[in-house]
Image (spheres, helix red, strand yellow):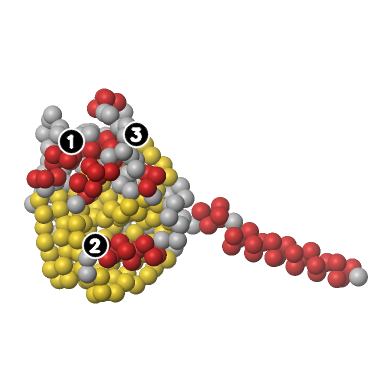
Amino acid sequence: MDQHWIKKPISSIFTGFLFLFFFNPLLWAANSSPFFQFSTINALLEGVYDGELTIQELIQKGEIGLGTFDALDGEMVIINGRCFRVNSQGIVEEVTLDETTPFAAIAQASFSNSHYLFLIDSLEELESELDQIIENPNLIHIFHIEADFQTLKARSVHRQTKPYPPLTQVTPNQAVFEFTEMSGDLVGFWCPQFFEGLNVSGYHFHFIDKDLKHGGHLLDCSFLLGTVHISPCYDFFVQLPHNQEFARANLAGKRIDEIQQVEK
């Protein structure tokens, strides 16, 4: 009788351990990628372009990310913990750690799942396929997509001078680049709709080629085969600027139309 009594609680303890490990969301969260962001997308829309956070401080928060630089000087791509600028001529350069950013987002590259995608003809189709992969639409998701792109369209913006115009007045003069038969990486995020005002709701990707020579903010793409690495984020951290431009900016209200305009 004693022997039977001993086996039963051990079995129960083991079962309880398995239940806690596989079904406890806090343990799953420990395997997710914390998401760090500096400033807000509404501040960028308002023309708050003065860099404040250094790249050295930024890359301490993660290994994969995107954003821009002081005075809106190009598109930022962070991959494998290295930070690159795609300037308005489409030239990629690795930046120094003392450069600053007015807006950026970064996460650890602790990807939990990988998927293969086939015969993608457009960015719209890519996003539709990624919709099927996202299991929890109430979480930020981090993406790293590797592919041999048949076609790819990207953009970068010109460095601005004060007084800074709002972002909607900058993007009509953006530099657009079109590439064919190029191997490279997309890094980016998907944010739920309730993040409007803080970040771009939906998908946001930046591109860099394998030779680290070309890149930009993704506008469109096509490929035959791509590998998608994805990780959810249960932890979200935001750091806000201390400058007067941010303090005076009108950040209230929804800016969906403006976001759509500057993202295209």
Q: Is residue 97 left or right of residue 195?
A: left
Q: Is residue 48 visible?
A: yes
Mark earlier in primary sequence (1, 2): 2
Name which residue lies at 59% across and 60% down.
23
3 or 1: mark nearer the eye: 1
Marks 2 and 3, how far apart in space? 31 Å
Labelled pair 2, 3 in contact (Cβ < 8 Å): no
Name which residue lies at 10% across and 51% down.
175
Amino acid type of the residue that numbered disc 2 sits on in the rendered structure: Leu
Report the residue marked by disc 1.
166
2 or 3: mark nearer the eye: 2
Name which residue lies at 39% across and 68% down.
114
Q: Is residue 51 above or below residue 260?
A: above
Mark earlier in primary sequence (3, 1): 1
Report the residue marked by disc 3.
240
Amino acid type of the residue that numbered disc 1 sits on in the rendered structure: Pro
Marks 1 and 2, how far apart in space? 26 Å
Q: Is residue 91 above or below residue 185?
A: above
Nearer to the camera, 259 or 68:
259
Q: What's the mark number on residue 123?
A: 2
Nearer to the camera, 3 or 40:
40
Nearer to the camera, 196 or 60:
196
Q: Secondary structure at mark 2?
A: helix
Name which residue lies at 14% across and 45% down.
171
